[in-house]
Image (cartoon, rainbow, N blue to C red):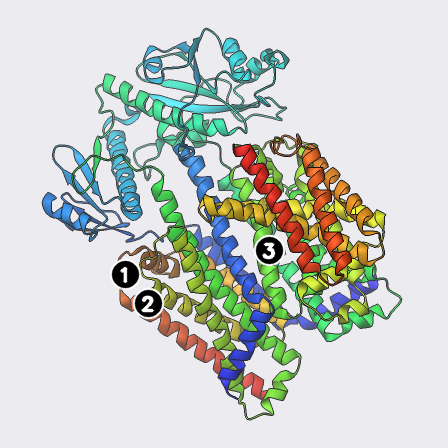
Amino acid sequence: MLKVTLLEIKKSRKKYGKRFTFLLLLLITFAALSAIMSFSGFKSDYMMYTAATQIELKDSRFITFHAEPPEGRETVKKEYADVYLGFDGTLYVITSGSKKSLAATEELIKAIRSDFEEFLYQRYGKKAYPVFVRAVYVDRGHIATPSGTVNLEEVRKAVERGETEVGKPKEKSGIPEHTPEPKIPSGGEKRTFDVGKLIFGEKGYTTPSTFSPPSLMGKMIYAFLLILPSYFAIQVYSSSFIEDRFSGRLVSLLSTPLSPRDILLGKMLPYFLLSTSLVLFSSILLANPSSALYILPPLLFLFSIQTLFALLSRSYKEMTFLILVSSLVITGYLFIPAIFAGTVPFSKVSPITLLLSNLEGETVTLREYFVSTLQFFAAFIFISLICVRALDAEFLEYQGGIVERFLEACRRVVTGYPSLIAYMGLSIAPIFMVEFMLATTLFAFPLHVSIPFFLMTIAAVEEFFKTVALHSAIRNGLEWWKAGVVGGITFLIFEKLLVVVDAGIFSNAMMAGMLVLPLALHVSTLLLFSYLIRLNPKGYWLAYVAATLLHFAYNLGVVTFVLA
Amino acid sequence: MSWLNVMVKDIRSALKEKTFVSIVLLQLFVAGLASIITIGMLVLYNPTFLAANQAKVGLVGDAPVLASVLKPEKKYGSLDEAFEDFYAGRIDAIVLLPEENSSENFVTVYLPKEEVVAIVATSYLREKLMEYEAKLRSMNGIPGKIPIKVFSPEMKEVEEPNGISASFKFIYMVLIPLLVITTALSAGGLFIDLISEEVESKTAHVLLSTPLRAWEIVMGKVAAALSLSALLTPVWILLLMINGIDIARPILVLVITLSISSLFVAVACFSSLSGDRERAQLIFSLTIVSLLPLFYISPFMPSGLIARVSAGSYFLPVEISLYAAVSAASLLLGVKILEKRIRDQ
């Protein structure tokens, strides 16, 4: 394996000479400078709205012109202006009711209120702020927990200590033990008026208008800094891999005594070490070396998926776009749950959420870490196994579309009942991840379109993974009905295991409570598929569509029943 | 055979290999991800979006003014009593104010951790505590809050909008610019792959042995990449429109997308000078990552312009012309240099 690693390093050194490395360093510096410049804030809302006004308005978001009330009403009605701001003893805003006009109205009112707060602060100072508020988040488990099991004394003590979180061990709290004295900034300080934030930053108290749910979005940039440089290392790896495939170097390596596993791991190792070093370097810069633990499992998964695409693609452009789509989906899977950190339990499905909590000083339990990273490790093993089996000269020469190539690769994996069971078990991880991300499409269309679309796509995804295994099993001589029954039962068992592992993150109402119906579903779709394949061994697509439609009908039935 | 033939050949192969489908999927995911982020932000910062702005609140402490505003589910004599109901799920939040006074009140709110109800309770309490603040201000002779009324053009009073500006800004200032960028990114990436495939498989030499000239090969690839942008843009504009998002000037959005795509293809031309696909894609990715933050830092940069044009806001035609001119010039320069390199090889 190390021989392949050394060869890969030698090839890279030859390719990335001093001049090219200098160019890369220049580009990295440019990227860093550009990122620093963006910290000054996004300014895309400049001149976004038009306001007709009776009184003076200075705001870079609004293009303004003077108009008296009757004229102002007309300009809004004819949509020459998005809003009209008038004064008849009371301030009033006229809106046409269009989305843009309503957005302009909201922004205008916010700006006026902000000005008013500034006026209050300048005129009355501290007296204008008689209320300060802070939140303490208490872990009460599930609502159904009997109150008798709660140690109220412990809660009371924790609350008295001023902890902002109660219910699980906390290493230390930065909150002072006594009620803090709010500190108002001195007059010379430049501010855009946000007393609450200033106080919040120092003492944990805020004014009512800035009181909001907990959010770790401010820390999101650190997670990006940790993971983004590795994307480039992985990109170079997959480019090098596909180049070796097309240039015939992979076939040459396969003709040596080296095993496919050694070749694969040997090629991956230098880039993985580079990625790990980049992540560790960024973690140390953040003074939190443990951050790397949350990033490495997704990186492993990215390495495996890009290897698979490099093996399946027929051309560079096919690989480029498969990688772009998959990278975007994986990034979404990592970062979107983190937006909801601290507010909804499913946010913990992503290790980035845990990373952000960790950066915030919260304790992350081993179980939480295990749950959030399990699918990455499982998917890495699943995909790597397929890649290792596909790494032979015959497969590399195989002509066919991407799905045909995937079927051919899986034929080398599912050769008997043990491998069928292992495939079904490990495939749950990528299926779960794809389905989780498909849920985002629910919000891309109106719900009456997106719900059936979602139900159809989850049926298509599950049946794809299941039928590929069964197709391979039948091609390798397993009896069609036995393979269908074993495959269906195994899939259900692992599906339920995932629910058990993820308990607490997802509601199990839809899945764990139901056993007989899903079992009937998974077995019957596979029996239907394998029966059709038995009739027509080359009719994969027809059999797959039939199984998917049966699954979709089931999904639709369950949702209709649940909604009813 | 001319550059048009090269373009048609490349588009056909992209369609055959489902590259086009991958890119549409890419756009769909960008839209899906942006939508869920918008919803996340709306839920976090404006929970009335959940259509549940009522929460059951328990009050602990001697605070008559707060009680009059809050109208709590129940008043408790001690925190312990309140926690019993809180853990049993009978109340969603506890508000603690040991003793009320007119100048400084430090309110502690106990909320359930990692439960959606906490978001709803936070929103509800924010409104109530703002009301409480205004009431105490009035009692101290300080104006409570500034009254602002909202009317329709027919002067009928309407409800004050809440939460719309966040999604509006996200759609026009983040999502649409992102879709333009991913379209341009796809064009640039496709161009590098088309050129690399030709050069690395030595088919470029075969093509050069025909009457086809080097610039026609490069122009064919450029045209194929830009055609992809021209095909993709109407697809995502249509998807947005189906989803109820107005694009005020679709033709101009297409013109800007093609300009940005030309700029990215020009970057791809320069990146392709590095010799092979691996290095070209790396330089291209790093350059685009460097450019992206700059797109958002000034109102006159692409993101701001795209936002204004697509939302039907004010813009100067010279802004669009300038981008088109700069992109065309960069592209011509890139094509010229790359063509010379291919000819010399």
Tags 2 and 1 both on a single chain = yes
Q: CA distance from mark 2 to mark 1?
A: 9 Å
Per the image, the residue denoted by label 1 is: B315
In the image as oriented, which residue stretches furthest toward the right?
A257
Q: Which residue is mark 3?
A: A327
Between residues B300 and A526, which one lies in front from this camera angle?
A526
Give whichever of A399, B76 is nearer the camera.
Answer: A399
Task: Tell me if mark 1 has few (under 14), some (14-19) or many (20+) residues whose alpha carbon lies within 10 angstroms of its own.
Answer: some
Q: Is residue A107 above or below residue B115?
A: below
Quadrant that contains the N terminus of chain A: bottom right
Amino acid at the residue labelled 1: Phe
Q: Chain of mark 3?
A: A
Specify few, some or many for label 3: CA neighbours under 10 Å numbering under 14, 14-19, or 20 or more: some
CA distance separating discs 2 and 3? 32 Å
Q: Amino acid at mark 3?
A: Ser
Q: Position of residue A71 (x, y in %)?
A: 11, 48
Report which residue position mark 2 lands on. B320
- Vertical placement of residue B150 versus B31, above or below: above
Q: Chain of mark 1?
A: B
Q: Is residue B31 above or below residue B210?
A: above
* Identity of the residue drawn at 84% across and 51% down: A479
Q: Looking at the rendering, which quadrant does residue A121 occupy?
A: top left
Q: Are marks 2 and 1 in contact (CB under 8 Å)?
A: yes
Asked whether the residues under marks 2 and 3 belong to the same chain, the reply is: no
